[in-house]
Image (tube, grey):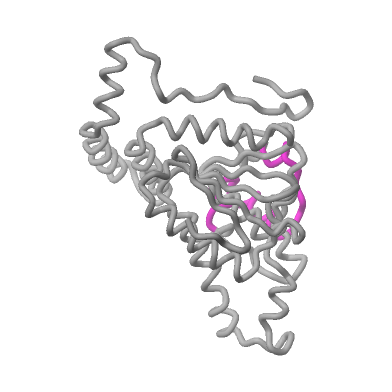
């Protein structure tokens, strides 16, 4: 894997870990980071050894959003950049967003500290979101006169409903980890010191599963909101036909017949109640 300047990327035992690595800037997304994210995701997608991706931030933050200083330097004369120039500049962020959204394997976002603006948008692109108890989320765009980007206009209404999405986007209101969990934006909330270990635990469980079945299931579920029952039944049938002929399925059936412990066992859920201690 290539060495990057603004991100860290490593693969071990089927788990790819992509770390936003600008901790002094709270991992704000610069133009360089957006380009490097796209390149890294493209390389990871092409690597057959990768079975699951963990997305995280370095230090005590996930991502503070777009780098405002970087935005300022992108304009030759502040306030004078044309809409066409701005649209051309947004292309790199669209490429990054699509690379993460279309990543074929499961993506786990481990969110600690701030996930503001595009940082929150990135987290919402993951398949599973884990939050630390000190995570803070905000679609901060209105505060700087901008529109939500990096896919938030697509993902947020699908996760929380249109009215709640409008409330979060139009007010730029900050929400806590427990409130985000109650809205359905996160799978679990954990003590901050347990966050990354839990993400690793879930990634290890997925890495032991059938890569064929995981990819097919993710693709089908992603297609579901824009589909209908007959179309989904057809997709279900073709996907199952592929899964039934896979080596992973054959081995799992044989292990079941021998009464062996399944390789794919999901770890016990762990979360923090809204007004109580961590529970399992």
> How many numbered circles does the render carry?
0
Please say if 249 is above or below 96. above
Q: Is residue 99 left or right of residue 7?
A: left
State which quarter of the image contains the C terminus: top right
Q: Residue 14 versus residue 278: which sits nearer the camera?
A: 14
Main SS, magenta residues? helix
Residues in magenta, as a range: 154-181
Q: Quadrant of residue 195?
A: top right
Q: Residue 226 versus residue 247: which sits nearer the camera?
A: 247
Q: Residue 266 versus residue 165: which sits nearer the camera?
A: 266
Please say if 67 is above or below 51. below
Give the percent coordinates (x, y) of residue 160.
Answer: 60, 45
Please say if 80 is above or below 55. below
Say whether residue 75 is magenta.
no
Give the percent coordinates (x, y) of residue 126.
Answer: 54, 47
Residue 223 visible, this orientation: yes
Residue at the location (61% across, 56% down)? Answer: 121
Q: Is residue 264 left or right of residue 93?
A: left
Give the percent coordinates (x, y) of residue 95.
Answer: 49, 66
Q: Quadrant of residue 218?
A: top left
Give the percent coordinates (x, y) of residue 244.
Answer: 23, 31
Say whether residue 173 is magenta.
yes
Residue at the location (73% across, 56% down)? Answer: 23
Residue at the location (54% across, 52% down)? Answer: 9
Q: Residue 156 versus residue 14: which sits nearer the camera?
A: 14
Residue at the location (51% across, 36% down)? Answer: 203
Residue 167 visible, this orientation: no
């Amino acid at each position: 894997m290539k060495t990057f300047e603004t991100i860290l990327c490593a693969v071990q035992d089927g788990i790819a870990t992509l770390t936003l690595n600008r901790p002094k800037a709270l991992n704000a997304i610069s133009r360089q980071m957006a380009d490097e994210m796209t390149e890294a995701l493209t390389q990871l997608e092409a690597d057959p050894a990768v079975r699951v991706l963990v997305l995280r931030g370095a230090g005590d933050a996930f991502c503070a959003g777009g780098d405002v200083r970087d935005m300022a330097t992108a304009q030759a004369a502040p306030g004078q950049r044309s809409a066409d120039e701005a649209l051309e500049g947004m292309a790199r962020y669209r490429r990054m967003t699509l690379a993460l959204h279309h990543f074929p394997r499961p993506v786990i976002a481990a969110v600690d500290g701030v996930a503001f603006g595009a940082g929150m948008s990135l987290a919402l692109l993951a398949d599973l979101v884990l939050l630390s108890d000190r995570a803070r989320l905000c679609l901060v765009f209105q505060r700087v006169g901008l529109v939500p980007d990096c896919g938030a206009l697509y993902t947020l209404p699908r996760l929380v409903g249109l009215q709640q999405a409008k409330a979060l986007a139009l007010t730029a209101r900050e929400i806590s980890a427990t409130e985000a969990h109650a809205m359905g934006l996160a799978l679990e909330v954990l003590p901050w010191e347990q966050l990354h270990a839990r993400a690793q635990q879930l990634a290890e469980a997925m890495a032991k599963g059938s890569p064929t079945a995981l990819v097919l299931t993710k693709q089908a579920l992603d297609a579901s909101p824009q589909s209908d029952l007959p179309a989904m039944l057809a997709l279900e049938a073709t996907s199952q036909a592929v899964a039934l002929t896979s080596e992973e399925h054959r081995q799992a059936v044989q292990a079941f017949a021998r009464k062996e412990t399944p390789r794919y066992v999901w770890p016990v859920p762990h979360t923090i109640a809204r007004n109580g201690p961590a529970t399992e």
